[in-house]
Amino acid sequence: MRALTGSADVALEDDRVLGFAGLFVASTIHIATPLVNQLGCELADGPMGAFVKTDASKETTVPGVFACGDLALAAGSVAFASATVRSPESAPINR
Ligand SMILES: Cc1cc2nc3c(=O)[nH]c(=O)nc-3n(C[C@H](O)[C@H](O)[C@H](O)COP(=O)(O)OP(=O)(O)OC[C@H]3O[C@@H](n4cnc5c(N)ncnc54)[C@H](O)[C@@H]3O)c2cc1C
């Protein structure tokens, strides 16, 4: 694919343009806050982008720093994000 044109037209490298009513795309994520780098938390690579590496208790590689939700998930959803805070393994977050 070379470019998206019009509302949902896909321009290919060979100059053909395929017109569609809409497109489903897999987006990627990026960490919005500089805090993660500032604290020195190690990152891991996920299918949708980088996320903060944590252990089972959601503690990051920086002792005493915990991460939960999308920030600490390879692929997020509301249910998974909530589960990272509510699971028994992540009880230390609630200290
Ligand atoms: C387009 C799209 C569609 C989606 N559709 C679905 C769906 O249909 N079903 C589903 O289950 N999930 C869906 N998701 C995923 C879902 O939205 C996330 O998994 C969920 O919102 C993660 O919750 P969270 O609290 O971890 O992060 P967020 O909802 O991203 O909340 C993080 C909050 O922290 C704030 N913040 C960031 N930095 C700072 C800072 N330095 N200081 C203070 N506040 C800060 C942000 O402003 C934000 O409000 C979708 C996501 C996207 C992008």
Image (cartoon, helix red, strand yellow):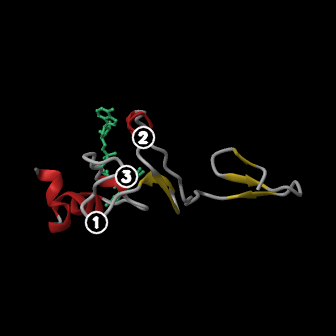
The residue under the point 20% across, 57% down is 85
The residue under the point 45% across, 37% down is 37
User: What label sits on residue 61 in the rendered view?
Assistant: 3
Q: Quadrant of residue 56?
A: bottom left
Upstream in the sequence, badge 2 or badge 3?
A: 2
Horizontal and vertical percent position of residue 72? 36, 55
User: What label sits on residue 56 in the rendered view?
Assistant: 1
Of discs 1 and 3, which sits in the foreground?
Answer: 3
Towards the viewer: 90 or 86: 90
Could you tell me which secondary element the residue under label 3 belongs to?
Answer: loop
- Are circles 1 and 3 on residues that touch, CB within 8 Å? no
Horizontal and vertical percent position of residue 1? 76, 56
The residue tagged 2 is 40
Classify mark 1: residues with Cα within 10 Å, few (<14), some (14-19) or many (20+): few
- Are circles 2 and 3 on residues that touch, CB within 8 Å? yes
Towards the viewer: 76 or 60: 60
Amino acid type assigned to the residue bearing label 1 in the image = Ala
